Amino acid sequence: MPKVLIIIGSKSDSEYAEKCEKQLEILGIESHLEISSAHRHPKKTGKLASNAESDGFDTIIAMAGLAAALPGAVAAHSNLPVIGVPLPAALGGIDSLLAIVQMPPGIPVATVAVGNPGAKNAAVLAARILALKYPEIKKNLEEFRKNL
């Protein structure tokens, strides 16, 4: 069963995680949510990312606002695909978007739109990645696309 780890930096980011979880469920993908700030809980964040693959996850979605270091910190500790969702903050999310998309060579983070559209698209992008390995997800994704 395909499984996605969702990490948010703060409980206040839960509304975005819920949109993502709902979209993953529609696509037949199990998810697990963790709250772990890259700045306030760096060891926990590193451990979550480092152990994600051995814990059975296929990809990671990380959501963050402001300095938005979480997706990059997660990517630094895992070889799984990491999808970053910039969240609205001080500059309407532009600050978060730029922080996530500007990763150094060798530590990529796939980055989607700011806020709720990005949260939903992160789930769809995860499904596209998982469809390469899981035929049932490919079928679910094709059905989803037909219904758009």
Image (tube, rainbow, N blue to C red):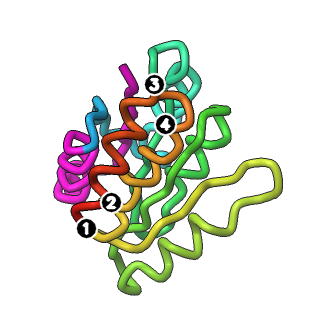
Viewer-side residue, 101 vs 144: 144
Say whether disc 1 or disc 3 marks the residue closer to the N-terminus.
3
Secondary structure at numbered mark 3: loop
Distance from disc 1 to disc 3, alpha carbons, whole Å, reads 27 Å
Q: Position of residue 33 (x, y in %)?
A: 28, 35
Q: Amino acid at mark 2?
A: Arg
Residue lying at 51% horizontally and 51% vertically, measured from the top left: 83
Q: Is residue 106 above or below residue 102?
A: above
Mark 4 and mark 3 lie on one chain; the one further toward the N terminus is 3
Q: Residue at x 20, y 44 (%)?
A: 26
Q: Where in the figure is residue 13, as x and y percent of width and height?
A: 25, 57
| Residue holding disc 2 | 145
Q: Which residues are magenta?
A: 1-26
Look at the image and tell me in which quarter the C terminus lies. bottom left
Residue position for label 3: 57
The residue identified by callout 4 is: 130
Q: Residue at x 22, y 62 (%)?
A: 147
Are the two marked residues, 3 and 2, in contact with CB atoms closer than 8 angstroms? no
| Cα separation between marks 4 and 1 | 20 Å
Disc 1 element: loop
Q: Residues within 10 Å of mark 2 (few under 14, many from 20)?
A: few
Q: Which amino acid, mark 4?
A: Leu
| Front position in the image: 12 or 28 | 28
Say few, some or many: other residues with alpha carbon within 10 Å of mark 3 (under 14 / 14 to 19 / 20 or more): many
Foreground mark, 3 or 2, reads 2
Q: Which residue is mark 1?
A: 148
- What is the secondary structure assignment of the residue under circle 4? helix
Q: Secondary structure at mark 2?
A: helix
Q: Is residue 6 magenta?
A: yes
Q: In whole angstroms, how far apart are the C-alphas of marks 1 and 2? A: 5 Å
